[in-house]
Image (tube, grey):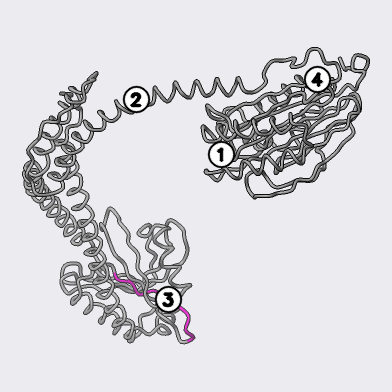
Amino acid sequence: MKEYRNPLRRSIFLGCGLFIVLLCLTLGILGFIIYYRGMIDKYHAYIGDALNLTLTEIDGEDLKACLESGEKSEKFRQTQDFLNRVKDNYAFEFIYVIKPLNLNETDNVMNIMAGVTKAELEEYGENATVELGSLTGDSYSAEVARYYLDQMDSREHISFFRNRTDDFGYMYTGLVSVPDASGNSAAILAADLNMDEIMQMLFNYILILVAEMTILSVVFLSGIYQWMNRRIIRPMTRLERAANGFVKRSHGQEDPEALVLENPDIHTGDELESLSDTIVTMSRDMTDFMKNLLKASLEKERLGAELSVATEIQDNMLPNTFPAFPGRKEFDIYAYVTPSKEVAGDFYDFFLVDDDHLALVVADVSDKGIPAGLMMVVAKTIIKNQALAGKPPAEIMRETNRQLYENNGGDMFVKAWFGILELSSGVFRSVNAGHVSPAYRPAHGSFAVLREKKNVALALMPDTRYEENAIAMRPGDNLFVYTDGVTEATDATDAYFGEGRMLEALNEDASGRPIQLVRVVRKRVGGYVKDTPQDDDMTMLSLAYFGPHGAETRLS
């Protein structure tokens, strides 16, 4: 048995492990985000309440006057006492009033007042308070000073920012503008909350999350592996062994009776049991199929041989020896058919009715293959028999239509073009029964499609009357009759070769030799369709008329 690099057990184990890790990570990250945002919202409310409360005790106009005079007013001292009480009762690292000045690296903020606790006053005395109007030196970076300046300019109610320093650690700061009497910002009231405790709580949360993920992964993987091993892996292994044994026995096996699948005996009561039963049934059906295929192969060989014979018979029925009339100088003729299947539905024929009349026929049966080939034989035979009886083209086609319609059990029809050329005068009478119109070139001119009367195709309607077309051919004229398989040949994009390309190919050769005209069109069609499969039969017949004195006017 073949050993695989990635057995099912390993794949299931790794897949389940990856799933539980991703699940735990997703839930953990979502929990972390919710917890973190909850903490931030809590501190927003905590800082905001303190700032709003403190702001009610600050007189912005009095602060401006104190800054201008450098003296602390009674109101100033009352505000300082209130800040001290706030600092005593709230867990702020700092609560203070400042005035931002610029974005320099030093002396960018002016101190106004700061809250101090009783413990700080007892320990540091007056050094615990800030001096009114003093500059902060390098305590604030230009980046932090920008937050305060932006608050002065925007005068929003409360804004927040985070900042980490070597001296104070991770701080979360709330800012609010202190308005003067005109509503402009006179100073900034700020409160700093130490976030180290929050970060420690988040770190502890992550440790708990990792521990939970580890425990959950071990429990889940162990349980799911045991369950899948019993319900999936073991039954699949038995099924694999049975299938491999069947494949080994089938290699080079010519006896269908030897194609037997050993029953893997799976009773899981689910889709695996159904799959096992299906494969066992399939192996039995395959044995029966092999038996039938063996019979069909023998039958196909017999049909192939019969098709080969039919193709040969059809080829022999069409005139394919050229030059066809080496003793006649009045005309030259060449024809070619390319079937899309073994037996063609297209056919052509040409023969002398008498010494002065040449009959031509090109036809296309609506179907393909053997049915079309049989219809072709019947139509060709009737047309030739009627022509040799000396009847005109219209009568020949009328009688052919009648006989084909009476015996048309397959609902097929025949698109045909038939004509008789009087060699001595060049008068050409023809009947078009639903066929594409031929191309005609006068001597020293260019090929163009004939404008002619068209009639109903053969075998479609009973008692149909057919009208003739007549042209007077002159020495050097050419006639090119073809089936729609030529113009409707398609390339890889299903685009037709078309009438225009056919006329262009015919006009490439000025010699007027029928064999050359057919070859040029065949080459041009082949270059157009390339490797696209042929969908329809293609038939071409080319006639060059040299007149009764053909030896003198015959084209070289």
Does label 4 or label 1 sit earlier along the sequence?
A: 4
Does label 4 or label 2 sit earlier along the sequence?
A: 2
Rendering coords of residue 405 (x, y %) = 61, 45
**The label number, if any, that marks residue 332 in the structure image:** 4
| Image position of 304 (left or right of 84) | right
Label 2 residue SS: helix
Residue 444 visible in the shown view:
no
Rendering coords of residue 417 (x, y %) = 73, 37
Say which of 20 and 476 sits in front.
Answer: 476
Which quadrant of the structure image shows residue 273? top left
* Amino acid at pointer 4: Asp
Image marks 3 and 4: residues in contact by CB distance under 8 Å: no
Label 3, label 4: how far apart the Cα atoms are: 104 Å
| Image position of 471 (left or right of 46) | right
Question: What's drawn in magenta, residue-wise?
Answer: 182-191
Q: Is residue 187 magenta?
A: yes
* Residue found at the far front of this picture: 389
On-image quarter of the N terminus: top left
Does label 3 or label 2 sit earlier along the sequence?
A: 3
Does label 3 or label 4 sit earlier along the sequence?
A: 3
Q: Which residue is mark 1?
A: 367
Label 3 residue SS: loop
* Amino acid at pointer 1: Asp
Q: Which residue is mark 2?
A: 297
Label 1 residue SS: loop
Image marks 1 and 3: residues in contact by CB distance under 8 Å: no
Label 3, label 2: how far apart the Cα atoms are: 91 Å
On-image quarter of the C terminus: top right
Label 4 residue SS: strand
**The label number, if any, that marks residue 156 in the structure image:** 3
Decide: few, some or many residues near mark 1? Use Cα within 10 Å; few <14, some 14-19, many ≥20.
many
